[in-house]
Image: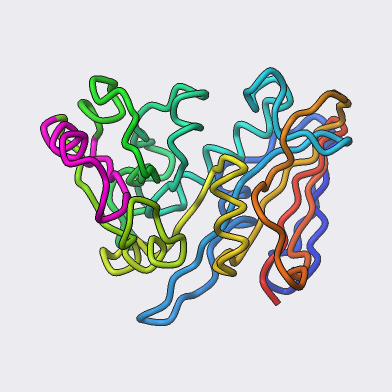
Amino acid sequence: MRRLFPVTDQTPARTRDGADREWSLDELADAYAYPELAADGHWLRANMVSTLDGAAQHDGRSQPISGETDMRIFGTLRDLADVVVVGAETVRQEGYRPARARDAFAARREAAGQGPAPVIAVITASLDLDFSLPLFTSALVPTLVVTGAAAPSDRVAEAVRAGAEVVVAGEGAAVDAARAVRELADRGLRRQLTEGGPRLLGQFVAADVLDELCLTISPTLTAGGAQRIAGGPSVTVPHRLAPACVLEEAGFLFTSYRRI
């Protein structure tokens, strides 16, 4: 079964004809299009996956609870974004590589005034990263390392030697989540996508800068002590989001909720 249930007028009303037809990339791109932004505006969305019992990972990685369509949506969200924001631990755990240019999205990105592929921005206080990885040495566009002003100078120098660009978004060693969003937007990276991990998403939630959550609900149960999709201290008042769309396939629910 493949269905798209539009919930608001922000999402196109479409009927999926035929249970075996795969959603086209254009259909997915239309369903997940960023809203129109003001000249000085920006939009931060998160893309996460969770099991039915709330686990964001299995054995430390998200891939075991994902699926084929989830990965198609994952790729679509990347290709719509100016920048993909990710935490250092997720880079280490998931083996991040540079974003690649895809012919299927070339015309759409050019029309939106975007480069051939999104920038990857890694949030890190310690810069405890392997700067010999292709993410830093072979990126189509330079990877950004977002850190604090008090970050270790030797690690900053190593990042620069590897080809990365360093962005300061905090007065101490830690990164200020709200400032990171602003610094990226000031670079023209206004359509922002974060893929976590849970600690980074928790920081964006706590700073009240998350505009949209794209959450895949995996039809699986894991039990155990895996993290939720967002970690860290709780907010004083829960943030309420409004549903934008829900897609279903093979028991997976692909949901989108936006800031009210």
Vertical placement of 28 versus 219: above or below? below
In the image, is 253 to the left or to the right of 209? right
Question: Which range is magenta?
Answer: 140-161
Q: Residue at x 30, y 23 (%)?
A: 130
Q: Is residue 143 magenta?
A: yes
Q: Residue at x 48, y 32 (%)?
A: 89
Q: Position of residue 116 (x, y in %)?
A: 29, 45
In the image, is 165 to the left or to the right of 252? left
The front one of 212 and 234 is 234
Vertical placement of 217 versus 94: above or below? below
Q: Position of residue 177 (x, y in %)?
A: 46, 60
In the image, is 132 to the left or to the right of 97? left
Looking at the picture, the colour scheme in use is rainbow
The front one of 91 and 67 is 91
Q: Residue at x 39, y 66 (%)?
A: 179
Q: Residue at x 36, y 81 (%)?
A: 39
Q: Quadrant of residue 49?
A: top right
Vertical placement of 110 versus 218: above or below? below
Vertical placement of 50 versus 112: above or below? above
Tell me if residue 55 can be seen.
yes
**Number of on-image labels:** 0
The front one of 147 and 76 is 147
Assign the N terminus to one quadrant of the image. top right
In the image, is 55 to the left or to the right of 212? right
Tell me if residue 17 can be seen.
no
Q: Is residue 154 magenta?
A: yes
Assign the C terminus to one quadrant of the image. bottom right
Q: Position of residue 174 (x, y in %)?
A: 39, 52
Q: Position of residue 129 (x, y in %)?
A: 33, 28
Q: Quadrant of residue 169?
A: bottom left
Q: Quadrant of residue 12?
A: bottom right
